Image (cartoon, helix red, strand yellow):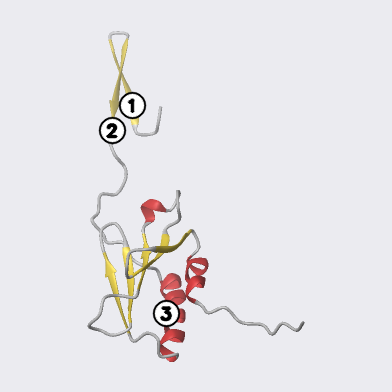
């Protein structure tokens, strides 16, 4: 029995009465990136803009997910979409990086690890 249930007794028989059917908030607030997540995304975005690879971005706050889209030019389709879907947080991770063709490059619970795919790998000189 939970804290929202109550028992009424009538003539020796107990009847279970629910006081609150659903305690989950029913607000229709859109999903958003928090300040820490946005700082991580904008840090990568700033480096790519400085390199001349990216030029524009858009942020969408939808009912089930938040999307940060990256564009090479304003009039094109996004090169990448960084999505936050809290409903997938337990299974696959809340964050995913998706290409323009819809291919999911990386999913995960940690945004920094998902964004690491966009960073160029440093080459090392190997001597034989």
Q: Is residue 85 above or below residue 8?
A: below
Residue visible at 34% across and 72% down? 68
Cβ–Cβ under 8 Å for marks 1 and 2: yes
Cβ–Cβ under 8 Å for marks 3 and 2: no
Tell me how far mark 1 sits from mark 3, CA to CA: 50 Å
Tell me how far mark 3 sits from mark 2, CA to CA: 46 Å
Residue visible at 42% across and 79% down? 42
User: To which residue does mark 2 refer?
Assistant: 19
Element class at badge 1: strand
User: To which residue does mark 1 refer?
Assistant: 6
Quarter of the figure that contains the N terminus: top left
User: Residue 74 in the image: x percent, y percent?
Assistant: 25, 84
User: To which residue does mark 3 refer?
Assistant: 42
Could you say which disc has been placed on residue 33 in the image?
A: none
Instruction: State which quadrant residue 71 falls in.
Output: bottom left
* Precedes in sequence: disc 1 or disc 2: 1
């Amino acid at each position: 029995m939970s804290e929202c249930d109550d028992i009424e007794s009538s003539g020796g028989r107990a009847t279970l009465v629910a006081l609150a059917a659903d305690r989950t908030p029913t607000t229709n607030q859109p999903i958003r990136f928090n300040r820490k997540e946005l700082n991580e995304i904008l840090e990568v975005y700033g480096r790519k803009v400085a390199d001349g690879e990216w030029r524009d971005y858009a942020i969408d706050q939808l009912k089930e997910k938040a999307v940060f889209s990256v564009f090479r030019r304003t009039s094109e389709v996004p090169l990448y979409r960084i999505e936050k879907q809290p409903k997938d947080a337990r299974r696959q991770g809340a964050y995913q990086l998706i290409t323009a063709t819809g291919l999911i490059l990386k999913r995960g619970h940690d945004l920094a690890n998902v964004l690491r795919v966009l960073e160029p790998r440093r080459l090392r000189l190997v001597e034989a």
